[in-house]
Amino acid sequence: MRDRALCDAHAKIFEEAEDPSSRSFFSEIIASVSDIKFSHNGRYLLTRDYLTVKVWDIHMENRPVETYTVHDHLRTKLCALYENDSIFDKFECGWSGDDQHVLTGSYHNLFRTYARGSSEAKMWEARPQEPHSLLRTRRVCGGAGARAQRGRRPLCFPDGEDPHFGERR
């Protein structure tokens, strides 16, 4: 990224130092950035890689100021994701109008929102509505009793373990 109009100096490189002990075969793949957005005020960058969303201050290139985990439950399944090419899936990210929330896509028409500066995270389902119909809220993750009443598989698994992982839906 340029920080001046003249191109007579180096560019800024935003990169977090990697812990050598956690390096694996998949490190470069899961760390590749699939989307980047500037905040509305221009001070921050929002980046999305396979497992996380990161907020960077443009005045601090050595580490992100905030990191939100999105698919941390998939970290143990990277081999299977590599074999079926899912590890190469790309997700977008975005800012709310006031830059106080960030959002990103996920699997199964789900997306997540994160309140900046707090641990508040919400998961939502995107699904088509009939034109001119009222939007209805829908519970995405419910307890075991709620699932049993509806007689369906849950859309997400709060404990991160999907017993049907890898099955076609």
Image (spheres, rainbow, N blue to C red):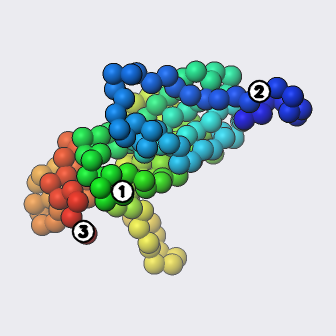
Q: Confirm whether residue 37 shows in the render.
A: yes
Task: Tell me if mark 3 has few (under 14), some (14-19) or many (20+) residues whose alpha carbon lies within 10 angstroms of its own.
Answer: few
Foreground mark, 3 or 2, reads 2
> Where residue 155 sits: x, y (%)?
26, 58
Residue shown at 89% from the left, 32% from the top: 6
Residue 168 is labelled as 3
N-term mark: 1 or 2: 2
N-term mark: 3 or 2: 2
Image vertical order of residue 109 relative to residue 60, above or below: below
Q: Amino acid at mark 1?
A: Ser
Q: Confirm whether residue 114 shows in the render.
A: no
Task: Tell me if mark 1 has few (under 14), some (14-19) or many (20+) residues whose alpha carbon lies within 10 angstroms of its own.
Answer: few
Q: Amino acid at mark 3?
A: Arg
- In the image, taking residue 75 as reference, residue 131 lies left or right, namely right
Question: 147 or 49: which is nearer to us?
Answer: 49
CA separation in Å, label 1 and label 2 = 35 Å
The residue labelled by disc 1 is 86
The residue labelled by disc 2 is 10
Residue shown at 61% from the left, 29% from the top: 14
> Where residue 86 sits: x, y (%)?
36, 56
